[in-house]
Image (cartoon, helix red, strand yellow):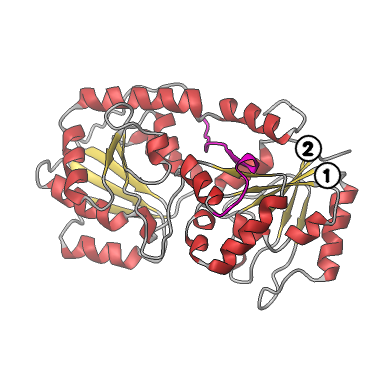
Amino acid sequence: MSYPLCVLTPEIGIISETFIQWDIEHLLPGRTVTVADPPPNGESVRKAPAWDISTPALRFAPEPGDPEPSPARQAQLRAFLTDHRVDLVLVEFLDFADRWFDCLKDTSVRIWLRGHGADLSTRLADPGRRETYRRYRDAHGILVPCHTAARRLTGLGLPADRIHVIPNHVDVPELRATAAHHDGLLHCLTAGRLVPKKGHLHTLAAFQQALATDDRLVLDIVGTGPLDEDLRHYVDHHRLTNHVRFHGPLPHHEVLAMIRRCDILLHHAVTAADGDRETQPLIILEALAAGTPVIATYHEGIPEVITNGVNGLLVTERAEQEMAEAIARLARSPAERTRLATEGWRTAHTAHSHHHVRPALLSLLDLPETTAP
């Protein structure tokens, strides 16, 4: 049997990378193979994977020092692609692609690269990395989730006709009724890795200001990361423990359930000090798809999804008072929460659903259509 598509990725099973799981399992179901090449300190090496895959897979063992792939490993990859009659390799993350790019060029496969987050922002501060990316003009194409990322790559000198904007996409269920809580509280949620670009400290500061105007507010924080201790210290120092709850990392289905139950999704994305940025956060799309109103920032590809006042609310990066006012505004107006939720769901349904994006992606990659599960 032939497997036209191979997804080449650093790791399998990272809790925040369900978008890679979708590429593997659902882009071309039953006709995809996977190659994973994890670094020695990768999350899937240090922890149990949060998810696994059912496709045929070549899983390299991590090596001390993370050297470049040896000739023996390159031969393994070429044999794997040949044995499964692979036509196209989709490499996840532009910075990772450099490890295997020359090896893939020596095969007959078509090479497509997919950028996601830090590889489209922080990495570009490195002159060596920018030069590496210029080599990708020899790829068949590069996928990015938003136009801001596309402009960043064309600014490096990569040909515009090789760069294709394919928006992030999610499952979009039927529009639900507005969440009803019997506790009389207004539930806010923020979820994601606890890293600077997610802006959790700004979210907390804004939430604290909004709480001073409406003591029904509660905030659930889902995720783990290097800022965990700082966030907990902020909550303790400002005596917010009765209104802020930490849940740590949760399986994706539990996060989705919390999104559907909450009243407002908060996502204060910022450009971090090292230049790290979001592109088009999946958590925002998942909230829109769930019929949950969103307050986010004018950051990277977010305004390509949310129009302020139409299908969500946007505030300036690091403008904590602005975000506090937006929270208070939605807290006091169930009607506006419902209106924004409905328009947000329409946006997700028409432009960011798997059913909408998958056919366009298959057509772009020139892959054979199969019936999605």
Please state the extent of the stretch shown in magenta in the rendering.
Answer: 156-172
> Where is residue 248, by image quadrant?
bottom left
- Quadrant of the image containing the C terminus: top right
Q: Residue at x 15, y 60 (%)?
A: 239
Which residue position is annotated with label 1? 86
Which residue position is annotated with label 2? 31
Mark 2 residue element: loop
Residue 242 in sight: no
Please tell me the numbered disc located at residue 167. none
| Residue 113 percent across, percent down from the top left | 66, 49
Give the main secondary structure, helix, strand or loop, of the magenta stretch.
loop
Which of these two is toward me, 79 or 189? 79
Residue 109 in sight: yes
Mark toward the viewer: 2 or 1: 1
111 left or right of 38?
right
Q: Are marks 2 and 1 in contact (CB under 8 Å)?
A: no
Q: Residue at x 82, y 64 (%)?
A: 74
| Residue 265 percent across, percent down from the top left | 32, 40
373 shown above or below 200: above
Which of these two is toward me, 125 or 301? 125
Q: Does label 2 or label 1 sit earlier along the sequence?
A: 2
357 left or right of 73?
left
Please check the rendered image and state whether residue 159 is part of the magenta-colored stretch, yes or no. Answer: yes
> Where is residue 198, by image quadrant?
bottom left
> Where is residue 263, by image quadrant?
top left
Marks 2 and 1, how far apart at CA:
9 Å
| Residue 129 percent across, percent down from the top left | 58, 65
207 shown above or below 364: below
Which residue in the rendered view is the most extreme toward the bottom? 65
Task: Tell me which amino acid carries mark 1.
Answer: Val
Mark 2 crowd level (few <14, some 14–19, many ≥20, 10 Å Cα)? many
Mark 1 residue element: loop
